[in-house]
Image (tube, rainbow, N blue to C red):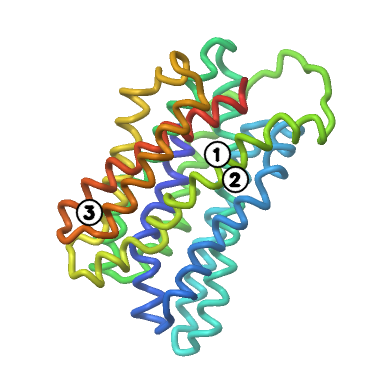
Amino acid sequence: MTAVLAGFLIIGVALPVLPLHVTNDLGFGPLVVGLVAGAQFAAALLSRIWAGSYSDRRGAKRSVFVGLLAAAASGLLYILSLVFLKAPLGSVAILLVGRAVLGGAESFIITGGIAWGLGLVERQHAGKVIAWVGTAMFAAMALGGPLGAILYTSFGFVAIALMTALLPLFVFAYVSRTPAAVLLGHGQHASFNVILRAVWLPGVGAALASMGYCAILAFSSLFFADMHWQPVWMAFTAFGAALIAARTIAGHLPDRLGGARVAFLFVIVQFAGLLLMWVAKTTLLASLVSRVENSLNDGDCVLECLYVT
């Protein structure tokens, strides 16, 4: 949980200010904002299977270590991009690479973190491990919004870059003392096709359900700024707080009602939330809607549990 909290905290601090940096400091429009924000998610998608395979072969703890080191490297690339501020194309190109590296780091940290936790507990506690690691992840998102805004307002994007480079190294030193999970035995090997047939449907559902989440992460700070709403990080913090509350209060619903039914219910909630955010006229309403809309991620937790079962 500590590794995941730190790994996603450096993601969280950048989310509300990265669009502002690309727009205000580098002078690019929404398309480039989308590319810079999306580079991390694309890299995370492409590296997910690799991260899982590495964790299985080399150990979950080592996977987390690789992720933390890659996250620190992305911070160094952020710093390098600032050297080329007078050449915006070069700066944004380096920033894109840094975001891609951070996406790979995210895959190794979250995959290794979950596998590490699962390896330390009995099977009947697997759902709790997923829930608590997910809570750490989105607690980092909730904390990262205001922290990132404070750092950016006070010191500029260089403060975000330095935090991204240094925090993973401190966490690396801390978690190195934590015992690795002991692999007690190997199950029957399954082919790629068998695994794909088992997970493709919940995977597609999770991907489509995450589009609203990605829209908020990439563009809500620009939306708030365009509407002259303050603070611009409120949507991110509301998102994280609502997700933690949903997992705490309604985390039992999949066991009682079934995963697919709960996921479908919260897809409707997501649609209503995004629609209301679009027509909102005040920052309070938009933030409250963000809280309600992002309770969908209780449905995402359902999809995660489907992968385990």
Residue 268 image position (x, y, % from top left): 39, 40
Say which residue label 3 marks: 286
Residue 51 image position (x, y, % from top left): 68, 42
What type is the residue that disc 1 sits on? Answer: Ile
**1 or 3: mark nearer the eye:** 3
Whole-angstrom CA distance, mark 3 to mark 2, is 30 Å
Say which residue label 2 marks: 107
Is the residue marked by circle 2 packed among few (<14), some (14-19), or many (20+) residues within 10 Å?
Answer: many
What type is the residue that disc 3 sits on? Answer: Ala
Say which residue label 1 marks: 110
Which secondary structure, mark 2? helix
Residue shown at 82%/26% (left/top)?
190
In front here: 142 or 254? 254
Whole-angstrom CA distance, mark 1 to mark 3, is 29 Å
Report which quarter residue 229 is drawn in: bottom left
Of the 4 image quadrants, the one containing the N terminus is: top left
Marks 2 & 1, CB-CB < 8 Å contact: yes
**141 is higher (above) or lower (below) than 309:** below
Q: How many numbered markers are drawn? A: 3
Is the residue marked by circle 1 packed among few (<14), some (14-19), or many (20+) residues within 10 Å?
Answer: many
Residue 291 image position (x, y, % from top left): 27, 43
In front here: 91 or 244? 244
Residue shown at 54%/61% (left/top)?
74
**158 is higher (above) or lower (below) than 295:** below
Whole-angstrom CA distance, mark 2 to mark 1, is 6 Å
Which secondary structure, mark 3? helix
